[in-house]
Image (cartoon, rainbow, N blue to C red):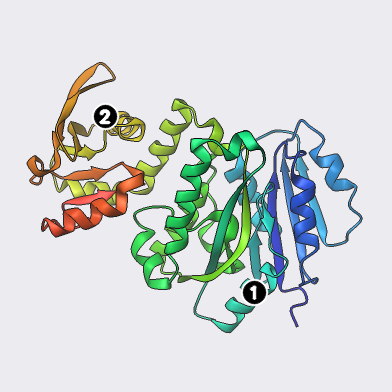
Amino acid sequence: MYSSQLTALMTTYNSSQYVVDTINSVLNQSLSNFDFVIVDDGSTDNTVDIIKKYNDSRIRLFCRSENKGVGYSLKEAIEYVHTPYVIKVDSDDLSHPERFTRQLSFLMSNPAISLVKSYFEYFADSPEVAASERFISRQRDACEINKINTEALIRENLPRWLCVEHTTYCARTDAIKAVGYPDQRLCEDYALFYQLHRHGYRMDCLPEYLVKMRLSNSSVTAGLTTERLYSWFSYLFELKKERILQLLGGRASLAIYGSGGLARCMHQVLTAQGIQVTNFIEQTTKPDVLVNGQLLPVKALRDCLQQRILIAAQPVRLQLVQQLTDFGLVEWHDFMVIA
């Protein structure tokens, strides 16, 4: 029924430690007729040698000697997809044996939907990771993302934050190609979904746990340096620049809700763009914060309701949206979520 309908899409970079488990979870799907495109992004370990040991005609491996980042690799990889549907696979995650069948069936039965995500759960690859605050935090993140489980909820939340986990999507290839991936090492996933939303493509959720995401000390999120965070937020600014300028409404300044690392990074990005940040905001007044040589006050939220507010506090983003709405503020006019 599904012969030559679907391509599994995966990029690799120094993935030798986990790629065998991932490939096996793909090749052992209940749906057997699919292509498997793999683009290796200049691995310096034996990832390519491992992949080449597979004697499976479904695998099409493309290699480059230079590492150019995941966004560049996906931008290239999607051009190798010639089937009507594409399903994303990350090189250290595991797909449920029924995943391809279930998500492809959903799209074929719902022709108006261009992309469907699924529920996912994290698993730790070591006792050390399992005991870490990072793992506990990621589990909370997964619960929040899985709660966004209808077309309406995705449409409402996607302009605010990344509520579609990249490794869980299955989509119509023409939609992904029409929007395309950006040449970015970070934020390539959110950029894809954000632009799909902007162009009117409909996205939905299959409320089944079909992907297990590995969390290890080598995961991308384990190495988010200040420099990488700045690069990420700089791209987010460009992605949401139109919305941010609408929020400013001709003003030269705004306030940032939050005073932690993300808020301070956003302060740096906005300042570089010529936008003044007058203060940070928390629920209650806190001591001033020194950021880039500038001492900024941290004011109580109730004292800042006349300001334009940019929310850069991920754990409480949705609670803040509700709280500010209850105060009578209007989202996208008086406040917005940056990430």
Q: How many marks?
A: 2
- Can residue 82 be seen from the camera position used here? no
Tell me which amino acid carries mark 2.
Thr
Q: Nearer the viewer, residue 75 or 264?
A: 264
Question: Image point 24% across, 31% down: which residue?
Answer: 274
Q: Nearer the viewer, residue 248 or 150?
A: 150
Give the structural element (helix, strand or loop) at label 1.
helix
Image x and y of residue 84, in percent: 66, 72
- Can residue 100 be seen from the camera position used here? yes
Image x and y of residue 175, in percent: 54, 67
Quarter of the image for the N terminus: give it: bottom right
Question: Image point 67% across, 41% down: which residue?
Answer: 125
Location of mark 2 (residue): 271
| Residue 242 appears left or right of 97 | left
Image x and y of residue 96, in percent: 69, 63
Location of mark 1 (residue): 102
Q: Label 2: how many residues lie within 10 Å, few (<14), some (14-19) or many (20+)?
A: some
| Residue 87 appears left or right of 55 | left
Tell me which amino acid carries mark 1.
Arg
Q: Nearer the viewer, residue 159 or 25?
A: 25
Image x and y of residue 200, in percent: 41, 69
Question: Image point 19% across, 44% down: which residue?
Answer: 309
Of labels 2 and 1, earlier in sequence is 1
Question: Image point 11% across, 55% down: which residue?
Answer: 327
Relative vertical location of residue 322 with respect to residue 276 in this rendering, above or below: below
Give the structural element (helix, strand or loop) at label 2.
helix
Q: CA distance from mark 2 to mark 1?
A: 47 Å
- State which mark lies toward you, 2 or 1: 1
Q: Label 1: how many residues lie within 10 Å, few (<14), some (14-19) or many (20+)?
A: some
Relative vertical location of residue 224 with respect to residue 161 in this rendering, above or below: above
Q: Extreme top residue here?
A: 293
